Image (cartoon, rainbow, N blue to C red):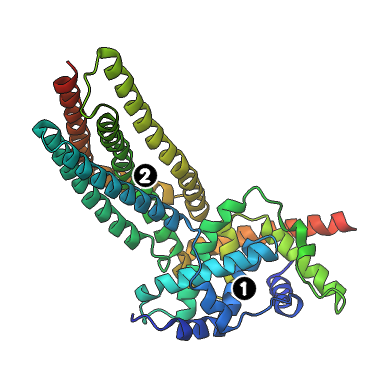
Amino acid sequence: MNDEKLKAMWSKTENLIGSSGYDSSNIERFLSGRSHSTGQYVRKMIYMDLVMKSLVIIALVVDSILYAGTSKVVSACAGGVVLLAGLMYFQLKMLKRFSEIADLGQTTRDKLVSMLTYLKTRFTSTLISMSITYLFVFVSGSLAYFFAVYGKVRTLDWIDIVVFLTFILIGLGFNFFTFRAQIRYHVKHLEACLSDLNDNNMLVVSELIEQQRKQDRINKLLLMLILAFGFTLFAILLKKFGM
Amino acid sequence: MQRPSKKEFSQLIEKHQAIIHKVTLVYTNGPADREDLFQEICLQLWKAYPNFRAEAKLTTWMYRVALNTAISTVRKNRNRPGFESLGAYDLATDENPEEAEQVKLLYSAISKLNSIDKAIILLWLEGKSYDEIASIMGTSKDNVSVKLVRIKRKLEELVNDSEKELS
């Protein structure tokens, strides 16, 4: 089949397919619709977590009001609020960066490369930051629960501590791996498209990812410090009130 | 670029909607999917418009956004049947059954290509030069040339196979 024959077949498309053209009023309606793109999906995940973090901050503020006479709890809540505010700032920065790379007006290659590099590097930090939310949900929820049931932070024994820590670790791990599994699917698709575009693309992406990972080491380190600080805070709370 | 009103932008898309229709035809399996993708592309064009630089041709930019959207959306349809379900398309078979059959064969063959090959062949069939295709896809002219030879060969095989099956 020669080129002319292919193009001739294609040119018949417009005559044969009754593609009902949309008028501008229909198109205007589409502009207000909801997006189902990967970019929107990632943004939605980050937004949802920001909302959750905001709610936890409110819960911690309420906890500190409830425990106004207990300076240790108030200090712990204040520490939690500061950490969460830091994480929210970090996530907002990531969101801004993501909006830049999610621009669909780039060439297909640039779009695929930037999205893949982001998802394979910086998004991991974002995932860690999102997973940490669970720790604070647990702490703020436990404090509210203790106040509602006992009117104070009740004494905890070793079994309580083991159970609480187990729940927290399961929650953190579950959040992290669930988010990562959802993204892995998108990553595989992006990799396949890049390989289809040009065999050398994946090599370029690998180099970019390696460079990005080096740059992101400080971010990851900071996140790990926050995570460690959060756990220490929780451990101190347990120790002060439990043992 | 300053964002126009939704009404002005809708009129702009209405004028160039053939581009979006062609992309949706190649990347979807039926009218419902086609409309969904059309909506998604319109929405993404609207969102991306503030980043549009006037030095690029509007139609080139529209192809970029439409194809990038289709490539990232088609993933969700990967387990759905291919273009075998062409009956769902309102092909005017009564008017010219032979032509309709040829178009069906071509679409059936294109539907079996991967997302990137679909984009390249679509742009070529639309009469874009190798330079334009390279600029939209972000690859080299040589790569486009090599890929097109492979894609056309593959399409020919697929169309021939389908013709044999039908006869």
The x, y position of residue A152, in whole percent, is 20, 28
- State the mark number for residue A36: none
Mark identifier at residue A120: 2
Whether residue B121 is visible, yes or no, is no
Residue in the image at 47% along x and 50% along y: A190
Within-10-Å neighbours for mark 1: few <14, some 14–19, many 20+: many
- Which chain does tag 1 point to? B
Which residue appears at 42% of the width and 47% of the height?
A202
Viewer-proximal residue among A128 and A147: A147
Q: Judge whether residue B40 can be spotted in this image.
A: yes
Please, what is the three-letter code of the amino acid marked with disc 2?
Answer: Lys
Check disc 1 and give the amino acid type: His
Of residues A34 and B38, the one nearer the viewer is A34
Pointer 1 residue: B21
**Label 1 residue SS:** helix
Dot 2, how many residues are within 10 Å of its Cα: few (below 14), some (14-19), or many (20+)? some
